[in-house]
Image: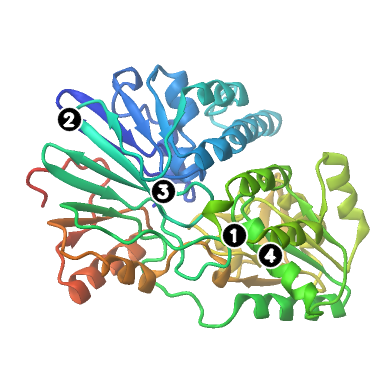
Amino acid sequence: MTGSRYLIRSRGHRVLIECGLFQGYKHLRDRNRVAFQVSPANIDAVVLTHAHLDHTGYVPALVRDGFNGPVYATPGTAELCSLLLPDSGYLQEEEARYADRTASSTHHPPVPLYTAEDAVRSLNSFRTQGFDSPFSLPGGIDATFLPAGHILGAAQVHLKLGGRTIHFTGDLGRTHDPLMYPPRDLEPVDVLVTESTYGNRAHPAGNPETELGEIISRVAKRRGVIMIAAFAVGRAETVLLHLSRLLARNAIPSIPIYLNSPMAIDASGMYQRHREEHRLKQHEFESMYKVATPVRSADESKLLNLRGGPMIIISASGMLTGGRILHHLAAYGPDRRNAIILSGYQAGGTRGASLAAGEKHLRIYGQDVEIGAEVIQMEGLSAHADSDELIQWMKTASQAPAMTYVTHGESDAADTLRARIKRQLGWKARVPEHLETISLEHPS
């Protein structure tokens, strides 16, 4: 499941690895409203693997509620959080205002989980650490960030404490991702805590760039609108890269392309500043950002809904949980000439997962919107390692961990990966329960 948080107790101190928001099904989202299991004031430090909200999105609430220690992250993660966290707070406020207007909340008045102001204030807690540079945490813990691929700044976290080593994967990237380098190999560890987002499936064998080109050509021929739901950080860049390459070899028609995501636009400078983390050469970087017209203002975004096709709109959020993409779905979703591309994993309980499962109606801003548009889920665009890639990555370790804990995945994905680890690697592995306590000295 999403919403990773791991609390480590060592020598009377508490360190939190990850501080994510629960997303997807309502019973999971409701956990965000439950008081934190430990008083935030009693947590000494937080360590983040990367900037996506299911790993960082609870930080503003933790700081607001009394946490006053450092939040450690790589420079890339800290920069991206300066975009993602305030935006998350703004969306929380928007949702509360909407619930108040429509009387659709059981709370009177409805309140956001946290505000944009809370998020901005929490950024003062961030402390940056580079890759491969050990740093000390309270409780006699030594930590090191190791490259994880996936998105800018993404890290694995390697900890040493009490003579033991524990390794958190965060979200691992793909071996042959077009944008990011692959994750660093796994060194010997006593305890491994792995993600399992794609633990029960493999990415399609075909070329996603070719598939994307075929979709665009098909929909453009019928003068349709192609709406690409892409995470503003990471996925939008991958989509732009594919589009620039398709256009360069005349594999798609030259139709208007709009990047309707201020966050993705702002993130472009961050990718430029951290060129050592990704594969792009300068000319590729420049080309991919020239293919799309940036859309910043809300008025410009609304005008796109009057324009009609053929055109391509790239907009967030990637799972249709909020953002400007919803307005485009309301405007263009009913028309069968149009297409909706879901660019990767769709967590259960999200609008994206509903569409991927064949749902023909979506609830958007209090209205039921009929979906007549063609829906395509392109899992080949995902920045997550799939089940095969996770197993191959684990095989790089020279010896088996004493225990592998399979986390951060839906139930079937986590259990399928657990079974593969035991069957194919011969390692001890299990899926821990929510709020379970384990002993690092005697992991079981």
Q: What SS does tag 2 mark?
A: strand
In the rendered structure, the answer to whether residue 423 lies left or right of residue 358 reads left
Compute the Cα span from label 2 to label 1: 40 Å
**Residue positioned 14% across, 63% down in the render:** 428
Residue 352's mark?
Answer: 1
In the rendered structure, the answer to whether residue 62 lies left or right of residue 217 reads left
Compute the Cα span from label 2 to label 3: 22 Å
- Residue picked out by circle 3: 155
Compute the Cα span from label 1 to label 3: 27 Å
Residues 174 and 351: in front is 174
Q: Earlier in the sequence, mark 3 or mark 4?
A: 3
Q: Determine crowd level at label 3: few under 14, some 14-19, many 20+ residues with C-alpha closer than 10 A.
A: many
- Residue picked out by circle 4: 241
In the rendering, at what x and y percent does residue 366 appear? 70, 45
Q: Determine crowd level at label 2: few under 14, some 14-19, many 20+ residues with C-alpha closer than 10 A.
A: some
- Residue picked out by circle 2: 10
Mark 2 vs mark 4: give the one in front. 4
Whether 111 is drawn above or below 219: the answer is above
Amino acid found under the numbered disc labelled 1 = Gly
Mark 2 vs mark 1: give the one in front. 2
Q: What SS does tag 3 mark?
A: strand
Q: Earlier in the sequence, mark 2 or mark 1?
A: 2
Mark 2 vs mark 3: give the one in front. 3
